[in-house]
Amino acid sequence: MMNQTGNCYIFGAGDFDGLLAAPAPGDLILAADGGFRTLTALGIDPDLVLGDFDSLGAPPDHPRVLRVPSEKDDTDMMLAVKTALEQGCRTLYLYGGLGGSRIDHTLANIQTLLYAARHGARAYLIGCGAVLTVIQNGKLTFPAGFRGFLSVFCAGESARGVTLRGLKYPLRDAVLTCDVPLGVSNEFCGEPACVEVADGSLLVTWQAENPVLP
């Protein structure tokens, strides 16, 4: 298993409503348990299938399978993210991690975004018409033409030096805390936009009829 681009696509067992971008040659492709069904339907052969296989019921007939005990500390999605980081991936696209009947897994996958950010990677959780990511002591820029809603939430004790530009409701050098949702329901205006945090972590989510990556 070799990664040549620094990009990884991870497919989980949750809802899947289409690819925003298709994997390119050299990208690492991981199936986390039931995500193998999605990849099979797409005609994509994963580099590795991993998990406890409670969703699939049994390990699939695939030459590269990593089976782990069902009683474990990591979710299958977190296990896949850790595998991607070990392979040197720094941009991760996570599908099948939102929706479904298990809101606890959705919350766990959101926490996984923070884990990736704290380990030097940018992970995007994609599905249900939305994209979520976490930035830490950095910024996220959007080119002109974006439309729809964008929200930012503190992902930790506090996020300082939060600045929003090019959005309907700008913000400058603000402090966001995890108990006040000040950054919810902002809007793109069609001009270049930027979300920046000087000290701390922000969960950034945007939602549109046809969401795209920045």
Image (cartoon, rainbow, N blue to C red):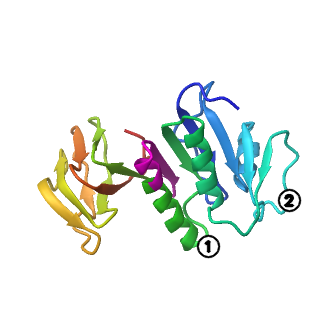
**x, y percent for residue 109:** 52, 60
- Left or right of 193: which side holds 206? right
- Give the image location of residue 108, x and y in percent: 53, 65
For residue 121: magenta?
A: yes
- The Cα–Cα distance between marks 2 and 1, rounded to whole angstroms, is 21 Å
Which corner quadrant holds the N terminus? top right
What residue appears at the point 31 percent right and 55 percent down from the top-left corner? 201
Provide residue 184's location: percent of width, then percent of height.
27, 64
The reply to whether residue 139 is visible in this rendering is: yes
Q: Quadrant of residue 22?
A: top right
Q: Residues within 10 Å of mark 1 (few under 14, many from 20)?
A: few
Q: Which residue is nearer to you in this view: 72 or 138?
A: 72
Is 135 or 12 nearer to us in this picture?
135
Residue 207 at x, y percent in the picture: 39, 54
Relative to 13, 117 lies left or right:
left
Which of the 4 image quarters holds residue 177?
Answer: bottom left
Q: Is residue 186 magenta?
A: no
Amino acid on which the number 2 mark rests in the picture: Ala
Q: Nearer the viewer, mark 2 or mark 1?
A: 2
Which portion, as a residue range, is magenta?
A: 115-129
Q: Which mark is residue 57?
A: none
Q: Among all residues in the image, which is located at the extreme left?
A: 172
Give the labeled residue for mark 2: 58
What residue is at 17 percent from the left and 50 percent from the top?
A: 163
Q: Which residue is mark 1?
A: 101
Element type at mark 1: loop
